[in-house]
Image: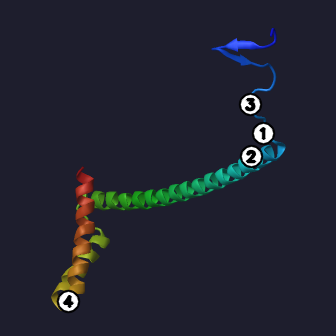
């Protein structure tokens, strides 16, 4: 009785504690772990690809906006000097000619888009 320990009224025998898993279970567990790791790496790779595409599209948009901003800055500096840029003249005369020659829906759409692009640049330069 020296080897046995009495804990809470129960006799505990020294030796194995609990059930030991068989080698088959270990192999299956290892394979599941490997498969899970493969899937995790695949998800990570897809996530990084998506993020890289997102970054590159945003960079392209930024470049396009910078070019547009530079164009508007040049237009403003030219107008400050009393010159009307040829692009603005073309927009203004193009809208006037379309409005006087043709009263179709296309004309109203083009004049709206021209007004929106011109108006949007002016309001952005003030803010």
The residue that appears at 53% across and 58% down in the rendered structure is: 56
Counting from the top left corner in percent of width and height, residue 55 is at 51, 55
Query: To which quarter of the image does residue 3 belong?
Result: top right
On the rendered image, what quadrant is the N terminus found in?
top right
Q: Please tell me the numbered disc located at residue 21.
A: 1
Real-space Cα distance between discs 4 and 3?
Answer: 87 Å
Counting from the top left corner in percent of width and height, residue 31 is at 76, 50
Front-lying residue, 15 or 105: 15
Real-space Cα distance between discs 1 and 4?
Answer: 82 Å
Pointer 2 local density, CA inside 10 Å: few below 14, some 14–19, many at least 20: few
Indicate which disc, 3 or 2, sits on the residue closer to the N terminus.
Answer: 3
Indicate which disc, 2 or 4, sits on the residue closer to the N terminus.
Answer: 2
Pair 3/1: label in front: 3
Indicate which disc, 1 or 4, sits on the residue closer to the N terminus.
Answer: 1
Indicate which disc, 4 or 3, sits on the residue closer to the N terminus.
Answer: 3
The residue that appears at 73% across and 18% down in the rendered structure is: 12
What SS does tag 3 mark? Answer: loop
Pair 2/1: label in front: 1
Please give the residue where the numbered disc 4 appears in the rendered image. Answer: 104
Pointer 1 local density, CA inside 10 Å: few below 14, some 14–19, many at least 20: few
Query: Left or right of 108: which side holds 87?
Result: right
Residue 84 visible in this rendered orientation of the protein:
no
């Amino acid at each position: 009785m020296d080897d046995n320990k009495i804990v809470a009224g129960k006799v505990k025998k020294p030796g194995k504690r609990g059930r030991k898993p068989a080698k088959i279970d270990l192999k299956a567990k290892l394979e599941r772990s490997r498969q899970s790791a493969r899937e995790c790496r695949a998800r990570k790779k897809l996530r990084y690809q998506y993020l890289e595409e997102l970054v590159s599209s945003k960079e392209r948009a930024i470049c396009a906006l910078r070019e547009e901003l530079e164009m508007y800055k040049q237009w403003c500096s030219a107008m400050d000097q009393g010159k009307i840029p040829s692009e603005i003249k073309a927009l203004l005369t193009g809208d006037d000619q379309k409005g006087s020659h043709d009263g179709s829906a296309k004309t109203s759409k083009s004049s709206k888009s021209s007004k929106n692009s011109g108006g949007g640049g002016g309001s952005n330069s003030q803010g």
